[in-house]
Image: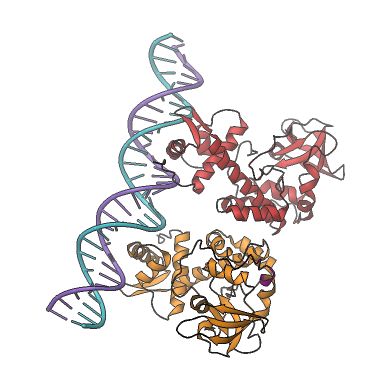
Chain colours: A orange, B red, C cyan, D purple
Amino acid sequence: MAVQEHQRSPAVEDYCKAIFTLESRVEAPVSTNALAERLQITPGSVSAMLKRLDGEGLIARVPYRGVRLTPAGRRVALEVIRHHRLLELFLAETLHMPWDRVHAEAEVLEHVLSDELESLIAAKLGDPTRDPHGDPIPSAELELPEAEDTRSLDRLREGEGGVFVRVSDADPEMLRYLSNHGVAPGDRVEVIERQPFGGPLLVSFAGGEREQAIGGQLARAMRIAPGQAPAGESSAESSPEVRARSERRGPRDRSSDATAGEQEPAQV
Amino acid sequence: MAVQEHQRSPAVEDYCKAIFTLESRVEAPVSTNALAERLQITPGSVSAMLKRLDGEGLIARVPYRGVRLTPAGRRVALEVIRHHRLLELFLAETLHMPWDRVHAEAEVLEHVLSDELESLIAAKLGDPTRDPHGDPIPSAELELPEAEDTRSLDRLREGEGGVFVRVSDADPEMLRYLSNHGVAPGDRVEVIERQPFGGPLLVSFAGGEREQAIGGQLARAMRIAPGQAPAGESSAESSPEVRARSERRGPRDRSSDATAGEQEPAQV
DNA sequence: AAAAAAATCTTGGCATGCCATAATCTTGGA
DNA sequence: TCCAAGATTATGGCATGCCAAGATTTTTTT
């Protein structure tokens, strides 16, 4: 008499992850359309899948009103996110995969990681708490530290500074750019000058060692923790290794695979 | 005008791998039933899939007569096998996963390994040529060394010896047993005594250091290269690391997941 | 050999997971 | 009250599996 348990397919995991992310952006139910956009599938398909997830107890759904994750659903999401971020760090650190490519790779592997492999990787990395982009890694008990107090670089005024703590992993372009210019999470930043009308920011990194003009889109993706000293537990840990391999090949931009995630990039 | 290329799904890869293995056991077309048995699905499903693979040029099919891989099909098979064996070694060596569990893990991951990740792993391992069970790893150009001259331990007569070069990766039981008793590929073996009527063999390992009774099923799965010295390129390489972690927890047998592959275990 | 029996293979109908398109319904603001 | 945006419901397609019925090949029996 058990309730058709279906499977925890990659699709289901992706839905949970997406709902979790969207939900934590604005504290409100997630709409069908928002999900469809994020997952790059049609609203019709999303609607059908949501009905199923509801039946499986992963989400609470109010037709025409949106969905929220149940505790079970949140667990699924956090497991996948833990997988994803552990993998990102593992690929970067242990296999020396370039910073900008780990995301796409992890996106696939996250659905296939056994519990055993997960814990072996976590052990190998010393139970890390941040991935290479500065995103926090949920603990084995699936606890995610409170979102720290950050602003996007975009919102800093001239003279303000802080520590660059994270950046969306979804856009390889940006990551490649930052990497090529030797910028990595953990760096200290300060806004030297703000061009008006959405113009670039002139920013100094690493205590004035380097200066850099940062465009609006990029500035919006970069999260800055306020304060002079490396705030909280974040900074110094994950940065040195990442820093180590900015393989400057000149600032030439090549437009390649722009992964989804257009609007506000996905900072969970 | 291109021919509907479909996808190279996990299913397709598994079929190619299975055909490759069966084909190289007996030099003859592979039958539908043999495939069905190996893949643990019904002959009907196999038949349908074979028709498709034929259409895609991966196999040459003669209805009611069996199939053979085309060069394209063989390439698919070898890629997957390369993935599988690289992963096995990687999991064992880099992540210290126990010998008997790497197979199941690799079975899933092999279908999801990108070219880039493959080459990073190969690089990290120093372009190895043998996996932890002694199976040869196809080169990046998909060349597989000629099968060396081996016999199963089963077939050695009293007084005969050689080097234990490989064992099927498909049965965790066996691997756990060998591991628990400190036996690994690369070891020198010699048959001390043969009990008649399918009874156990009394075998000495590592130059008489240890003696061990080996039952018929296990003896059939262990491949021995003849000769006194470590034959060819095989032995000494992969063995020491593997040896290092035989984590003896007593010879207690627990019957767990017996992966498919009943008859002659799958030595490609 | 020829016929009968057994083994093997193929076909056709059906199910599930997941997505698409198109038509239809709800909701909430003008 | 009406409409447009958003959500939902058919309906259909593709991949992959199952089962059961029919076709073919092989083996055995006579």
**In the shown orientation, is residue A77 left or right of residue B257?**
left
Which residue is at a point 51% across and 42% down the rendered structure image?
B40
**Is residue A244 found inside the magenta-colored segment of the image?**
yes
Q: Residue A182: horizontal and vertical position, in percent?
A: 64, 73
Q: Foreground residue, C5 or A47?
A: A47
Determine which quarter of the picture holds residue B264: top right
* Residue B254 seen from this side: no
**Is residue A267 found inside the magenta-colored segment of the image?**
no
Residue furthest right in the image: B208
Q: Foreground residue, B125 or B265?
A: B125
In the rendered view, would you say B178 is above or below A41?
A: above
* Residue A30 seen from this side: yes
| Overall secondary structure of the magenta section | loop
Q: Residue B256: horizontal and vertical position, in percent?
A: 61, 51
Q: Foreground residue, B182 or A29?
A: A29
**In the shown orientation, is residue B60 left or right of residue A36?**
right
Residue stretch in magenta: A242-256
Which residue is at a point 47% across and 71% down the rendered structure image?
A72
In the rendered view, would you say B25 is above or below A9?
A: above
In the rendered view, would you say B148 is above or below A7?
A: above
